[in-house]
Image: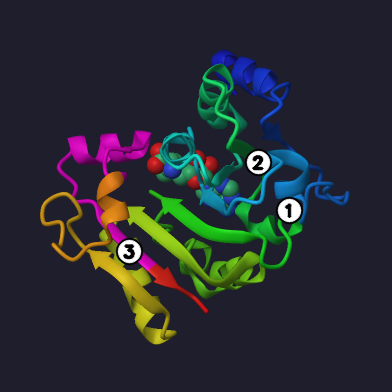
Amino acid sequence: MAKNKLARFAAVKSFDNFFEPSLQEEFALKGKWRSDYFKNDHPIVLELGCGKGEYTVGLAKHYKDKNFIGVDIKGSRMFVGADEARREGIENAAFLRTKIDFIDKYFDKEEVDEIWLTFSDPQPKKPRKRLTSPLFIERYRKILKPGGVVNIKTDSDLLFEFTEEEIERNNYECLELTWDLYGSIPESIDPTIREILHIRTHYENLFTAKGAQIKYAKFRIN
Ligand SMILES: C[S@@+](CC[C@H](N)C(=O)[O-])C[C@H]1O[C@@H](n2cnc3c(N)ncnc32)[C@H](O)[C@@H]1O
């Protein structure tokens, strides 16, 4: 790891809003994120593969009555969001360093209200590893409330086409779906999506600079 990354990784470990649980031990906040960490009974929203956590922090600023947790395996990236939340006193945002593969070790049944997948790796050669594959959706099902939703925002045609097919094949309830979020926002789109269009992630900015169209879908898996 480069020196700067190492320094960020070392620093983030000392933040109160950053958790790096051991896989071997029971995680004390499982089932208790609301009561023992956020100290409220607000809904919990996860950003999976959060990178620098632009959605976690941006949504937390916008929706004070919800709790947001960014999840990623790269602590040095999460430093950016965790540090911003800490410096700005944003108390409804936290970060969890783990592989998403083990997400149900850290959240209890029905503890989560909503999931965001932001510019997830399209995994061209490994469909099982795509974050909207049946393998991952089953993991989300274990922690999502009945009626809980999954949002996906991506530049990738491959990942979006795959997700669209999964929605159809599995009869998930599709709430929104657009192949060109910024180019042709449907009149009928949920107004809350318009409210948060200003939140752009690091990878989103890189991809849009290259002319990529941003796709967005929102669906219910149960
Ligand atoms: C392309 S980046 C997008 C980051 C951020 N959401 C953005 O839009 O800028 C994908 C992120 O997902 C994380 N990631 C991919 N697979 C993961 C997994 N199985 N568990 C945890 N993190 C994962 C990577 O570490 C990386 O930070």
For residue 66, which numbered disc appears in the image? none
Residue where numbered disc 3 is placed: 217
Is 203 one of the magenta-colored residues?
yes
**Taking 221 as reference, is 73 above or below it?**
above
Which residue is the extreme one toward the right?
Answer: 25
Q: Amino acid at mark 2?
A: Leu
Instruction: Give neighbour class at mark 3: few <14, some 14-19, many 20+ (Cα, 10 Å).
Output: many
- In which quarter of the view is residue 138 placed? bottom right
Q: Earlier in the sequence, mark 2 or mark 1?
A: 2
Q: Earlier in the sequence, mark 3 or mark 2?
A: 2
Residue where numbered disc 1 is placed: 106
Q: Residue at x 28, y 35 (%)?
A: 206
Q: x, y percentage for residue 208?
A: 21, 40
Q: Residue at x 18, y 66 (%)?
A: 188
Q: Residue at x 66, y 51 (%)?
A: 41
Q: Amino acid at mark 3?
A: Ala
What kind of element bears circle 1? loop
State the separation of the CA atoms marked 2 and 1.
9 Å
Extent of the magenta region: 196-218
State the separation of the CA atoms marked 3 and 2.
24 Å
Would residue 155 be visible to someone looking at this image?
no
Q: x, y percentage for residue 169?
A: 39, 85
Q: x, y percentage for residue 154?
A: 32, 53
Q: Residue at x 71, y 41 (%)?
A: 39
Whether residue 54 sits left or right of residue 40 in the image: it is left
Whether residue 106 sits left or right of residue 25 in the image: it is left
Instruction: Give neighbour class at mark 1: few <14, some 14-19, many 20+ (Cα, 10 Å).
Output: many
Would residue 202 be visible to someone looking at this image?
yes
- In which quarter of the view is residue 37 placed? top right
Say whether mark 1 is within 8 Å of ligand 1: no
Residue where numbered disc 2 is placed: 96
What kind of element bears circle 2? strand
